[in-house]
Image: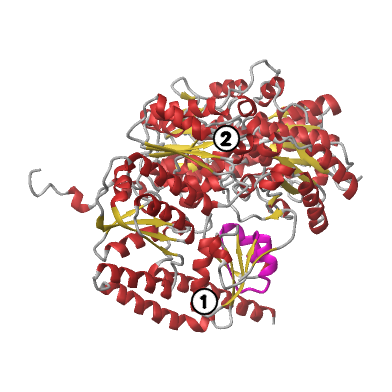
């Protein structure tokens, strides 16, 4: 309906996250990859620390370690040095060069430099691409989807000239959005493959950031989708994108090699899951597997059980655009009042929403959501939730106050059930706490 | 703005006692680890809890880093707010000075902090904004100090950032206020950031010896107390790598004697307390310190006994920066833990000399090289435990090596006598945890002989 902004000069308690972090996250879902941030040391140290804190896994990332004089004279010399070192020492399959605000403002042309570098060294076999991601635009979500788009671009260029494409109609490329947890991606893969399809997730964080026990440490990513599978995904008969931001990469595949695509904007709740399963049922001709029929009933039953808890409650959600859209759809089904919806930046999906959305920060959330019973945001929101007396439910990125947050499921019937129970429990606990304190104070 | 990188500047940031010509080594592209100067400046200044800290730049510098440092507050929490000017394309093109000015006014009006620190970032430094002028003008207008911190990420390492923050304190804060008449003047603690509440343990100790803390620079500090730091009688530099220059400058400007010390380990703690009393030139206080340290050490050795038994002969690899590299060695030695490998990448020459004094000949020095290099040392030296920063924690977990977090993100305080006991406990818990055996043993079906020859 409307997208609003509160008028204030500074961002207070930002929920926005640098785009380059989204790029690093996307590359964690590729096997033997190395994201290389073209910027100063902090540009890679902060994302590394933050991602490590959220996923509780080592994170592969490197930097061109720009210093003042490098920026003034020749920033690409550092990049070349970094590339030489990374290539000779670790031999990654995939390299993503991620531009930052620093290189963007300084006007460094690293895209051309990479082209020359590849030509001069006759680089073949691997995948090396660059993506322009200044931090004064977008947020984690846009950084993630732009990176996937650039990756796809590079794949198409590498394979494109090899002539005829054989389409495999039993194979689906899944483009999971940045807000999905490793467990979510796993759930989606299972869901789609239960209809008899082969699924290639691009990127696939479900096998790299889900807490695998591959022993030994490597500076490159462990797990994730390997390069040959990535290239094979170009043969897929269909692309399924989850999250509005993933439409662009899906469209890119469509425009270049004609793969049809379907975008599922919401991924949470009964209706969204119904839609997905119904679609898969139609295109495969297979019946919906029994376990999902069961899960649907489980979900409805638990929503019936919980609806007493949600009656009359109001909720505030501050999340990245796609995630907010998803969560809002789920909240609709719970019948709670959506007191305030806050997001980090404006996207077409957000602009098209029927509800009022605010682009802002967690301070805006505090002001607009005053009186809300439940606060849903990343862990930065804990203090704000406390100040307005709302129960706090961590979601999105980063979450550090909860173990296993990266393994929580939000998609499918199972995910909706998990979230409904979690939110209900938090509200129940809050009620019990306030009852106890009112008894004590009498 | 003054030129940002001067060689002399750099060399001091690397911590040598006399400034030398050799600047900090340039980070190696493709193999660099650790934060930038902006990060360093924030580490030093964010513990000033009642001040507002405004980051002037695009969102990532603030958005990716706020609430990531383990410094604790006993009261005000304004410094835990993330403030950023959040520059966009058009701000970059047309200059963000107006936005900065408006942001300062907004924060002053809404939060009424005693001071506002404004941090430059790579982009605002690159487009040549006159932050100093904006800050000065704003300070005059709104009547509270607005302090520019010129430490953009690309000038260098975290350590240089610490040092630049110290310079900002010297230039704009220290000496601008006077203590209340009844204030008991004593010691400034410099470079102690109250990680996991360590400052509180230290202060309790000092108080029981009758030594007053004049200014905390900057763990759990209030802005006001730093303005009168020049009235202290002694400076103790807890993290010398970062803020030694500050102490030296205060000695020459205000005649305050300083010493470098540490609170890791009972011996170091006792030494530090004695040194304070000695430099205060107070016989009575020295006697009180002697009584206190004797009592505390006796009590500690009693309580440590069961843990010493378990820890004796265990081998550790220590990978941490600056002063902690040698001071933690002392603590570990007191517990009977042998340090078989130690990181020196962020240590000064003095630090390395102190390390050498404390470890045996068969200890390996790890000058650089990140995670793989540390793990190699752990394996080769058959270490039982790895002690390093949070960034390497999950690296150790992937290798199934017991681990203790020693850096700024941690949640356990290891300073003072209490801290040593806590460290002993943590080491024991970590080593004795059943997970190491469980994770190392395969699933039952993997133990069976293969059903057929493959």
Q: Name which quarter of the figure residue A88 lies in.
A: top left
**Residue at the right extreme?**
B181
Image location of residue A157, percent across then percent down: 37, 41
Q: Residue at x 38, y 54 (%)?
A: A254
User: In this rendering, is residue A93 above or below A55?
Assistant: above
**Is residue A247 on the magenta stretch?**
no
Front-most of residues B158 and A291: A291
Q: Which residue is mark 2?
A: A41
Image location of residue A72, percent across then percent down: 64, 27
Q: How many marks?
A: 2
- Disc 2: which chain? A
Report the side of A40 relative to A206 (left or right): right
Image location of residue B251, percent across then percent down: 81, 26
Q: Is residue B430 in view from this perspective? A: no
Front-most of residues B221 and B59: B59
Report the side of A185 relative to B262 (left or right): left
Quadrant of the rendering where the C terminus of chain A is positioned: bottom right
Image location of residue A192, percent across then percent down: 31, 63
Circle on res. A332: 1
Q: What segment is highlighted magenta in the picture?
A: A360-387
**Residue at the left extreme?**
B452
User: In this rendering, is residue B269 above or below A17?
Assistant: above
């Amino acid at each position: 309906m409307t997208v609003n902004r509160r008028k204030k000069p500074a961002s207070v308690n930002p929920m926005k996250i640098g785009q380059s972090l989204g790029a690093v996250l996307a590359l964690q879902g590729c096997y033997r990859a190395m994201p290389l941030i073209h910027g100063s040391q902090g540009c890679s140290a902060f994302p590394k620390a933050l991602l490590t804190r959220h996923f509780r896994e080592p994170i592969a990332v490197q930097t061109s370690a720009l210093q003042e004089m490098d920026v003034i004279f020749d920033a690409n010399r550092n990049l070349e040095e970094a590339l030489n070192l990374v290539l000779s020492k670790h031999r990654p399959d995939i390299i993503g060069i991620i531009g930052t605000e620093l290189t963007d403002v300084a006007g460094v042309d690293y895209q051309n430099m990479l082209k020359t570098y590849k030509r001069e060294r006759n680089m073949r076999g691997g995948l090396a691409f660059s993506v322009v991601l200044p931090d004064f635009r977008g947020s984690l979500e846009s950084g993630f989807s732009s990176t996937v788009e650039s990756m796809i671009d590079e794949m198409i260029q590498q394979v494109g000239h090899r002539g005829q494409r054989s389409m495999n109609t039993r194979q689906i490329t899944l483009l999971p959005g940045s807000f999905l947890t490793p467990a979510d991606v796993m759930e989606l893969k299972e869901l789609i493959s239960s209809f008899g399809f082969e699924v290639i997730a691009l990127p696939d964080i479900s096998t790299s950031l889900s807490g695998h026990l591959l022993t030994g440490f490597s500076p490159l990513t462990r797990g994730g989708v390997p390069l040959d599978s990535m290239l094979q995904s170009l043969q897929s008969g269909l692309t399924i994108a989850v999250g509005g931001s993933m439409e662009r990469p899906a469209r890119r595949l469509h425009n270049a090699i004609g793969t049809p695509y379907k975008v599922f904007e919401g991924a949470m709740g009964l209706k969204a899951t119904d839609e997905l399963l119904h679609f898969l049922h139609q295109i495969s001709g297979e019946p919906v597997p029994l376990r999902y029929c069961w899960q649907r009933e489980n979900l409805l039953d638990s929503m019936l059980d919980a609806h007493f808890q949600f009656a009359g409650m109001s909720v505030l959600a501050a999340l990245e655009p796609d995630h907010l859209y998803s969560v809002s759809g789920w909240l609709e089904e719970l019948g709670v009042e959506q007191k305030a919806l806050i997001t980090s930046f404006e996207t077409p999906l957000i602009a098209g929403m029927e509800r009022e959305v605010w682009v802002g920060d967690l301070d805006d959330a505090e002001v607009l959501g005053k009186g809300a019973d439940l606060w849903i945001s990343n862990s930065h929101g804990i203090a704000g939730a406390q100040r307005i007396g709302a129960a706090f439910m961590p979601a999105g990125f980063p979450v550090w106050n909860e173990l296993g947050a990266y393994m929580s499921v939000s998609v499918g019937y199972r995910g909706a059930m998990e979230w409904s129970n979690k939110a209900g429990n938090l509200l129940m606990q809050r009620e019990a706490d306030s009852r106890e304190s009112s008894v004590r104070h009498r | 703005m003054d030129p940002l990188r001067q060689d002399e500047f750099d060399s001091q940031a690397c911590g040598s006692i006399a400034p030398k010509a050799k600047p900090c080594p340039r980070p190696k592209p493709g193999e660099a680890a650790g934060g930038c100067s902006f990060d360093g400046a924030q580490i030093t200044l964010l513990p000033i809890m009642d001040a507002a800290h405004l980051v002037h730049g695009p969102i990532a510098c603030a958005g990716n880093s706020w609430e990531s440092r383990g410094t604790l507050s006993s009261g005000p929490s304004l410094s835990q707010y993330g403030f950023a000017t959040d520059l966009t394309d058009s701000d970059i093109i047309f200059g963000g000075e107006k936005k900065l000015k408006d942001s300062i006014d907004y924060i002053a009006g809404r939060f009424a902090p005693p001071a506002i620190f404004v941090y430059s970032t790579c982009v605002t430094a690159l487009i040549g904004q006159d932050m100093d002028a904006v800050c000065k003008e704003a300070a005059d207008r709104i009547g509270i100090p607005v302090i520019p911190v010129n430490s953009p990420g690309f000038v260098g390492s975290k350590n240089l950032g610490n040092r630049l923050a110290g310079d900002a304190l010297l230039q704009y804060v220290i000496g601008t206020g006077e203590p209340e008449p009844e204030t008991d003047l004593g010691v400034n603690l410099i470079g102690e950031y109250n990680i996991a509440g360590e400052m509180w343990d230290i202060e309790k100790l000092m108080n029981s010896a009758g030594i007053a803390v004049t200014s905390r620079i900057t763990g759990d500090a209030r802005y006001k107390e730093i303005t009168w730091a020049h009235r202290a009688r002694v400076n103790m530099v807890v993290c010398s790598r970062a803020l030694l220059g500050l102490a030296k400058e205060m000695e020459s400007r205000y005649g305050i004697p300083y010493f470098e010390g540490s609170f890791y380990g009972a011996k170091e703690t006792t030494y530090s307390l004695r040194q304070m009393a000695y430099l205060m030139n107070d016989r009575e206080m020295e006697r009180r310190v002697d009584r206190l340290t004797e009592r505390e050490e006796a009590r500690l050795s009693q309580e440590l006994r069961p843990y010493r038994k378990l820890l004796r002969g265990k081998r550790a690899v220590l990978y941490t920066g600056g002063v902690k590299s040698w001071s933690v060695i002392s603590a570990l030695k007191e517990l009977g833990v042998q340090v078989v490998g130690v990181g020196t990448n962020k240590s000064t020459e003095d630090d390395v000399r102190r390390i050498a004094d404390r470890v045996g000949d068969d200890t390996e020095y790890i000058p650089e090289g990140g995670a793989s290099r540390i793990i190699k040392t752990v394996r080769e030296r058959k270490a039982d435990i790895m002690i390093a920063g949070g960034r390497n924690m999950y690296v150790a977990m992937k290798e199934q090596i017991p681990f203790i977090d020693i850096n700024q993100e941690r949640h356990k305080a290891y300073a003072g006598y209490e801290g040593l006991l806590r460290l002993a406990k943590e080491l024991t818990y970590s080593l004795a945890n059943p997970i190491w055996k469980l994770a190392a043993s395969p699933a039952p079906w993997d133990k069976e002989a293969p059903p057929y020859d493959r």
